[in-house]
Amino acid sequence: MGAIIYYLLTLAIFFAIYSIYAWGLNIHFGLTGILDFTYITFVAIGAYFAGVAAMGHAQPMGMGGEYILGWNLPFPVSPVLGGIAAAILAALVGFVGLRRLRSDYLAITTVAVGQIVWLVVGNQTSLFNGWDGISGVPQPFNSSLFHLSYNQYQIPFLVICLIVAFIAWRVAESLTESPYGRILRAIREDEAVAAALGKDIFRYRMSAFIIGAIFAGVGGALTVEYIGAFNPSGWGVLETFIVWAAMLVGGQGNNRGMILGAFLVPVLFTEATRFITIPGHPLLMESIRGMAIGLLMVLVVRYRPQGVIPERKRVYRLNLISQETEDSAHGHAVEG
């Protein structure tokens, strides 16, 4: 029974973290229409920088390997630093890709950037210990406050994740429902019309790109502080595909849909089936899990392209009848 509770708590933690991922990607694509196929790179940069900021100095010939920083910063300073690092990378990528590139060309650029960062991090050992990655990332508050074993620490960390997820939810909702969010949707639907109305397309797209990357960086920071380690094998094409699948299945442009997508794809289809094995074929379930996610994507795109919970239609009407009445009354008053 204890193992089942431990596993359910693990799924709940991943659910909260993937919800943060999905809200960030939703700001990129669902709200603004930016085809970002390197989103998981922002997650990785946030995880790496938060990890090495929370760890102590790298010791020569130590078990943790080589890495930069080693500032031993407490929570929540380290996740904030992870979000800032992801935002800086997004600003650099956006400055190159968002000013002139659109649609497929931008998507290709983001894929190339992700591959470059992946290779640099893996081959430059002095950054984040190369292909072996970082390990021994301290758990938030555990050494100074809780003093719990790894299994006992599940509930406190779940509370931390839920608090951060709630803050991320409120920020995402505020952005979506604000005039800023309406401008982003206008840019998504028709950039030419938005530009004709005097909106600075590049500035709005860049700001949305950076904000979404901050969500990714903070989510990556929570991931590395929960797992305690991170390496290049943890962020690749499959991880990007899973976050995109969660967003599309849930319903792009809808923050509530992101919650459902995070539960269906990363938790139910990916994590909840991880320990299911088929007798005689121990590796078969891994392939079946990938096929199940792909089939789910195909069915959603074919039969419900707007997602399970589609974006709410917003109708802005001018009260023309009352305006005409007021104009008529004003005209009569002038004549009188």
Image (cartoon, rainbow, N blue to C red):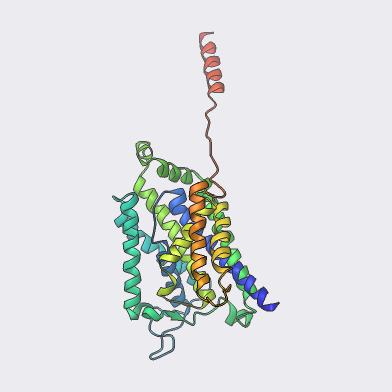
Residue 200 visible in image:
yes
Q: Position of residue 133 (x, y in %)?
A: 41, 79
Q: Seen in the image, is 301 located left or right of residue 91? A: right
Residue at the bottom extreme? 61
Residue at the front extreme? 280
Residue 160 visible in image:
no
Q: Quadrant of the N terminus?
A: bottom right
Q: Nearer the viewer, residue 238 or 28?
A: 238
Q: Position of residue 94 (x, y in %)?
A: 34, 56
Q: How many numbered circles does the render carry?
A: 0
Q: Position of residue 9 (x, y in %)?
A: 63, 71
Residue at the top extreme? 336
The residue located at (37%, 60%) in the rendering is 90
The residue located at (60%, 81%) in the rendering is 150
* Residue 108 vertical position relative to residue 318 in the rendered view, above or below: below
The residue located at (59%, 79%) in the rendering is 142
Q: Nearer the viewer, residue 335 or 51?
A: 51
* Residue 271 vertical position relative to residue 153 in the rendered view, above or below: above
Q: Position of residue 113 (x, y in %)?
A: 32, 63
Q: Quadrant of the C terminus?
A: top right
Image quadrant in which you'd find residue 118: bottom left
Residue at the right extreme? 1
* Residue 157 vertical position relative to residue 57 in the rendered view, above or below: above
